[in-house]
Amino acid sequence: MAFKKSFGFFLHLIQCQQPPLCLSWFSSSPSSSFLRDIMVSHKEFATAGKKPGLQVWRIEKMDLKPVPEALHGSFYTGDAYLLLYTTAAPSYFIHMWIGEECSQDESGAAAVFAMQMDDHLGGGPVQFREVQDNESKIFIGYFKKGIKYQKGGVASGFQHVVTNDANVKRLLHVKGRRAIRATEQDLAWSSFNMGDCFIIDLGQNIYVWYGSKSNRYERLKATELAIDIRDNERRGRGTMHLIDEGEEPAEVIEVRHPLKWTSPYGSLLETALPRDLFCPSQISDASGNMKVSCVAESSPFKQAMLSPEECYIVDNGVDGSIFVWKGPKANPSERKAALSAGDAFHRMTPLPQIQVIPAGGEMTLFKQFFCDWKDKDETTGVTKPYTIGRIAKVPQIPFDAATLHTNKTMAAHHGMVDDGKGKVQIWRVEKGAKAPVDPSTYGHFYGGDCYLILYSYNLGGREKHIIYTWQGLKCTQDELTASAYLTVLLDDSMGGSPLQVRVTQGQEPPHLVSLFRGKPMIIHLGGTSSKSGHSETASTRLFHIRQSTSGATRAVEASSSNLNSNDVFVLKSPKVLYIWRGTGATDEEMEASKHVVGFLGGTPSQVQEGKEPADFWSALGGKKEYQTSTGLKKMVKPPRLFGCSNKTGTILVEEVPGDFTQSDLATDDVMLLDTWDQIFLWVGKDANDEERKEAPRIAKDYVNTDPSGRKGLPITTIQQGEEPSTFTGWFHAWDPKMWETDPLERIRKRF
């Protein structure tokens, strides 16, 4: 599965005239006039969003009824629900969930309450329309143990009450490796298959049934869900039993009909095929109140396409999602009716998910489709993720090299396994072989070359190694191929223990930049460091100097005259040599500029931003607009974790929902961790050859097709059990001994 297809989507403009946009989904409902008249000050809104966490309500007789916390994650298929998730910021996420057998009245009521809660919370929440079996990753992430679908609903007399009823008899079909769903089925042999796991809930006894063809990871997730049922729905009073296919006790056999297999391998035969992309050109109703026109048919888009006076629909066809963006200056009635517009669009498409996003509340999944997206006070360039699973802007973790070995979270956020004072060896790829680089020139890299950098350091009395494969933007295809081959040979010669990090020019991780003993890493735009092939340098050269959050500094030769107020630049032409200091530049960046000047030669003149002489601009080819914001980069980029698996016979990539943990690393898969400025490939010890082979290609496609401009990010491959702190620090409470015993076996020993 290539990530490329998942980035295709369409942008539509919603144009509404007076009278305000009608709520089309209520037009046939006899209760619609009553629902529209419900006051915004509903009694349940009094506690909505008062503290961080999840609140759930069910629609009962056109009213909101709270669902007990012990039953969060359990949904009746005939009902509609309203959910509110509040972060510590606070930020708000409103979800309306629609069961597949839900009535028009109930779904309409859920929509009205969602809009009223949005209004009650100031119009700032992000709204989602969730459909059973097609929920968003954010929604699924609230229920890490899994979602349970139960038959019936309010109309059938089923009530959400905590009970220890010993007469309960139900069968739950558990599916999914990352997004866990348990759907109630008929309690009969015909509902079972060998490829999946099932929970047979008989009240006092809860059985977890393992199909003979199910794998260990699926069994683990089913068992965890059963434990959740016992601890919450039964308040700890149920008795757990783990049984394999063919070893069913008499109580289980008695409640089922004669054996009849429907599909011998169940979910093993399932594949996830991408949806077709399409773009309806217009949506309108008979009265002419609403018109939806297509603005652009392919990404990446420009942020300027979003006018603050309008609302827009973003159709992400392959991912099955619809985004509705509300401009800050749009008509109030139009903004409140945005979810209705999204639903009207949804009726003409097979896309199940709708997300309504206010301006200023855009999430990463929305921003990634705009190649030039910048938040207020954000400068150009890749931004840093500062926290895990949070929407709020939080302080950046300060860098302290002395604590790198003990503070794994800090090491991960800064991409530093240590302080960079270990042993460094560098080779240049030359004629298909490794040519040693003169240590006196360590730190200089040329865009026409490829390099192998071997870094060795000591951790807890054990020697560790990292192989950085640096690939210049102007190197040849032969050199690229040779660099990959030579990396493998070097890794093999060291027993396969080093970490391998592929680095593209301009995307150097902080740790690599820190290896040059306090000097900046200097990256030359083109040419080669080979004496036999050294090319002529340009007569006018501009070096951009920036210090990373970890304190390491990089000087990159720029191909244009674009300046940046946050940084320092060194400009050399045949007539002038200047050090230009932006208003937001640091003293450390100024100190690094001296090393660049020492390499270029000459006596520089220092100039402050705003006081440039005429010959400065003349050397740059004239004064042009440049990035003048000195604000810190505060945009939060939550890390994302994906599983790469071919258990269905086809390589599929599935995102882990919610705040991921170490337990989400499936040992029989290859996992992809995206920390925004670096990609990690974690190879489980039980991953098969096909997964190991395809995962690097998927990782490369993932970053190269990202419209936000992250092409060429470093990709680090890690073997299970050899995880560095730059990886483990993204996981809360990492346990290096976790896999010494099988998690499923640990659970089984408890029963």
Image: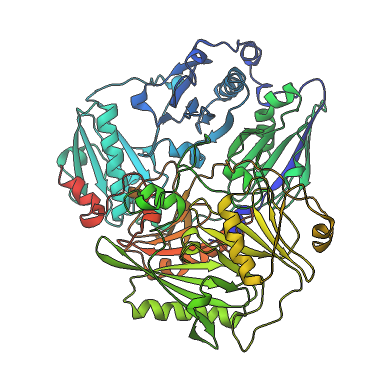
Q: Nearer the viewer, residue 685 or 31?
A: 685
Q: Give the number of callouts.
A: 0
Residue 43 location (% of width, % of height): 50, 10
Along the horizontal axis of the image, is 679 left or right of 300? left
The residue lying at 57 percent from left, 60 percent from top is 592
Q: Does 477 appear above or below 312?
A: below
- Does residue 260 appear in the picture of this structure? no
Image quadrant assignment for residue 214: bottom left
- Does residue 651 appear in the picture of this structure? yes
The residue lying at 70 percent from left, 63 percent from top is 604
The residue lying at 38 percent from left, 20 percent from top is 159
Residue 18 location (% of width, % of height): 82, 21
Image quadrant assignment for residue 522: bottom right
Q: Does 543 appear above or below 76?
A: below
Q: Nearer the viewer, residue 176 or 698?
A: 698
Residue 571 location (% of width, % of height): 72, 63
The residue lying at 33 percent from left, 77 percent from top is 494
Residue 114 location (% of width, % of height): 58, 23
